[in-house]
Image: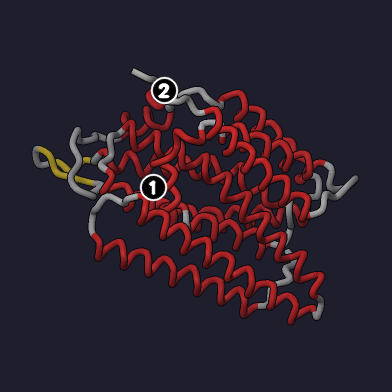
Amino acid sequence: METIAPLWLWLTFGGIVLASLFIDFVVLKKQGAHEIGVKEALNWSLVWIALSFLFNGLFWWAVKDTTGSSEIANTKSLEFLTGYLIEKSLAVDNIFVFLLIFTYFAVPTQFQKRVLMIGIIGAIVLRTIMILVGGWLLAHFHWVLYVFGAFLILTGLKMWWAAGKEPDLEDNPALKLLRRLLPVSKNYDGENFWTVENGKKIATPLFMVICLIALTDVIFAVDSIPAIFAITSDPFIVLTSNVFAILGLRAMYFLLAAVADKFHLLNYGLAVILVFIGTKMCLVDFYKIPVLVSLGVVAGILVVTMLLSVRSAKAPAKI
């Protein structure tokens, strides 16, 4: 797997991620269990977005310095930005599922942030492994690209069909399996995943939640990672755009959870994006859609979907 990024940029990226997680954990520990408001979520979301753009600027400079070409640097920087936007938009679907899980288990808001933080770390580890495996497959078996593309198209069509329908978590096979394997307390014990009842150590509902969050991320990673490979095959761009999109997931969850009802058509837009990316991947050997066009299409679909959601929202009934 070839990459245009120099070794020092890989090390810098690793340092940024570790520092970001450390700061997030320190802030999390100092704050303790508390409810995150819209203002705090918005501020943290802006911090993560700004950090991503600053890193993209550093990436542009590194590529220009390595290749001596502003044109190559512009292209690679656009690939990062497009990949970041795609992963960020697909993460919205994760958030709606997280909201469903938290609502189903009646997780107190002040406990949700710890679950999301652990989920983010798990997602980074999992996606790093999947990206490396996916990159190796594409480097050795080019036809896998068409499999990824077809899978994204089918996933997009399935998402369109399921949009607007309320999923039934009670019939989730993973949840049924967990309930058979583990005795679970009916009550929460703070932020603990385990508690003691009648002298026996048993799981709390929060442990069930973290298991379902982890399973959800595995499912969505299968969709989102092939999507970024449609934009670039450079493992550095694939990995960094994914990780930076994930880093802001916790803040974005609390932000979108407060306004989820206002963007009820967003899943339709995500479905169209997946079909577009899958088509782009299947056409790669016949016609390569420019990165700038891909960026414009993805951004345009998101903007249009959000505007239509706001305009079509039902006005409150007059008494």
Tell whether 34 sits left or right of 8.
left
* Quadrant in which the C terminus is drawn: top left
Which residue is the extreme one toward the right?
Answer: 286
299 or 90: nearer the viewer = 299
Tell whether 41 sits left or right of 69.
left
Q: How many marks can you see?
A: 2
Q: What element carries label 2?
A: helix
Looking at the image, which residue is at 46% across and 57% down? 45
Looking at the image, which residue is at 40% across and 33% down? 100
x and y percentages locating residue 294 in the rendered image? 75, 49
Q: What element carries label 1?
A: helix
Question: Would you identify the image quadrant in which residue 279 lies?
Answer: top right
Which residue is the extreme one toward the left?
Answer: 198
Which of the numbered marks, if any, corresponds to residue 254?
Answer: 1
x and y percentages locating residue 276 in the rendered image? 73, 39
x and y percentages locating residue 179 in the rendered image? 31, 30
Which residue is the extreme one toward the front?
Answer: 319
- Mark 1 burial class by Cα count in 10 Å: few <14, some 14-19, many 20+: many
287 versus 316 height, above or below: below
28 versus 185 height, above or below: below
Tell whether 276 sits left or right of 47.
right
- Residue type (three-letter) at the residue carrying disc 1: Phe
x and y percentages locating residue 297 in the rendered image? 73, 45
- Residue type (three-letter) at the residue carrying disc 2: Asp
Looking at the image, which residue is at 20% across and 35% down? 185
305 or 207: nearer the viewer = 305
Q: Mark 2 or mark 1, which has the lower sequence index?
A: 2
- Mark 2 burial class by Cα count in 10 Å: few <14, some 14-19, many 20+: few
Mark 2 and mark 1: span between their CA atoms? 26 Å
- Residue marked by disc 2: 171
Q: Do the residues labelled 2 and 1 touch (CB within 8 Å)?
A: no
